[in-house]
Image (tube, rainbow, N blue to C red):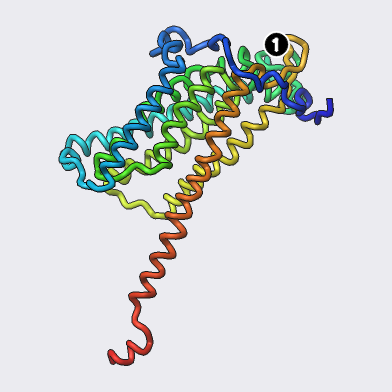
């Protein structure tokens, strides 16, 4: 096969060719537990018409509003009211708390499937050899076999993080992308234009999360975990700004850098899923991490979405922290009197 073995129960090889076909006629994956909030709407919200319609209406509305804001930069009168300021504060606090809840929930789900030794039938009397087997990928997950792997916990739809919590937290994270458009509403209400970065980011996130959850694509866990972590920090920063708390520019720069890093590192790790095969003790065979055209489509869609987004964020970083710095330094230099002027003054 021309593969490279690693972790004892997984290997890297060429992706299966069938995952690059059109994802037509695929059944929905298992949704959140039936008793949970909005679980009965899982199928309805994952209809392709939902994200396409909302994303299109959002993008068109922002384009029209930007056209108005090009000449009229007067904030709406409501912006000066306590009601609006209270909404902005509640919006940022709510998304900060929600993002932290999602990140914590997904971290716990990963721990349950990857790192919790009790899941492989280990106890206080577990030998050092057994622990070594687990850490090297030789111990089975969920106590079903003596062979399993880190990759099985990520890729197996029935015995991995999808069933342990990604189907639940991922579904709500997808829905949260629709609410996040209020970020843009707030910007426009204040008399500013929405940047291409802002519009592309929100519209694309709706479609990317839809694809990942609709087809239960394993790499979508990366989007949910790391994006929720970044959003926790980002909305905490926005909360401080709404409270008029001065935040050092270095922290804002670090946050933007972290966002770019998540795109590059997360996207690279997501692509790795294409080439991974893991041992499945349930079948006694090696399985591709991405099993069908839907999972392959979701991964490729996310990667294609991330490429321009990374470019836009890098441009934003340069504009905010390099060009603005040079402009500020140039202004100070121009304002400072020359030596000859100083002598004349004296």
Q: Residues within 10 Å of mark 1 (few under 14, many from 20)?
A: some
274 or 81: nearer the viewer: 274
- In this view, 169 is above or below 257: above
* Residue in view at x 47 percent, y 51 percent: 317
Q: Is residue 168 left or right of residue 276?
A: left
Q: How many marks?
A: 1
Quarter of the figure that contains the N terminus: top right
- In this view, 211 is above or below 340: above
Whether residue 118 is visible to the viewer of this picture, yes or no, is no
Residue 174: image x %, image y %? 45, 24
- In this view, 23 is above or below 247: above
Q: Is residue 141 left or right of residue 77?
A: right
Residue 147: image x %, image y %? 75, 17
Quarter of the figure that contains the C terminus: bottom left
* Residue in view at x 44 percent, y 36 percent: 201
- In this view, 12 is above or below 312: above
Would you name the residue on which mark 1 appears? 144
Mark 1 residue element = loop
Residue 247: image x %, image y %? 36, 51
Q: Is residue 65 left or right of residue 154?
A: left
Whether residue 15 is visible to the viewer of this picture, yes or no, is yes
Query: Dividing the picture into quarters, in which one does residue 323 lie?
Result: bottom left
């Amino acid at each position: 096969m021309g593969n490279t073995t690693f972790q004892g129960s997984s290997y890297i090889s060429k992706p299966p060719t069938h995952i690059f076909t059109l994802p037509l006629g695929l059944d929905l994956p298992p949704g959140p537990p039936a008793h949970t909030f909005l679980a009965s709407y899982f199928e309805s919200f994952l209809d392709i018409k939902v994200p396409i319609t909302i994303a299109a209406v959002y993008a068109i509305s922002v384009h029209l509003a930007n056209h108005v804001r090009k000449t009229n930069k007067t904030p709406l009168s409501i912006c000066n009211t306590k009601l609006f300021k209270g909404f902005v504060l509640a919006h940022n606090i709510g998304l900060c708390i929600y993002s932290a809840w999602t990140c914590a929930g997904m971290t716990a789900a990963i721990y349950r499937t990857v790192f919790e030794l009790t899941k492989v039938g280990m106890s206080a009397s577990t030998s050092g050899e057994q622990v070594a087997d687990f850490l090297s990928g030789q111990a089975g997950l969920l106590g079903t076999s003596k062979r399993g792997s880190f990759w099985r916990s990520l890729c197996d739809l029935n015995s991995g993080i999808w069933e342990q919590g990604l189907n639940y937290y991922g579904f709500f994270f997808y829905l949260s992308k629709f609410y996040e458009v209020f970020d843009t509403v707030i910007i426009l209400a204040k008399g500013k234009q929405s940047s291409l970065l802002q519009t592309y980011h929100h519209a694309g996130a709706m479609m990317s999360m839809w694809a990942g959850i609709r087809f239960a694509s394993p790499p979508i866990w990366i989007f949910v975990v790391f994006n929720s972590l970044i959003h926790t920090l980002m909305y905490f920063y926005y909360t401080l700004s709404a409270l008029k708390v001065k935040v050092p520019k270095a922290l804002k720069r670090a946050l933007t850098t972290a966002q770019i890093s998540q795109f590059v590192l997360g996207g690279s790790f997501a692509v790795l899923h294409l080439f991974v095969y893991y041992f499945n003790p349930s079948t006694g065979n090696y399985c591709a991490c991405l099993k069908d055209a839907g999972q392959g489509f979701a991964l490729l869609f996310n990667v294609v979405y991330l490429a321009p987004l990374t470019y836009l964020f890098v441009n934003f970083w340069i504009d905010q922290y390099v060009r603005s710095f040079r402009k500020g330094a140039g202004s100070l230099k121009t304002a400072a009197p020359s030596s000859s002027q100083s002598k004349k003054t004296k």
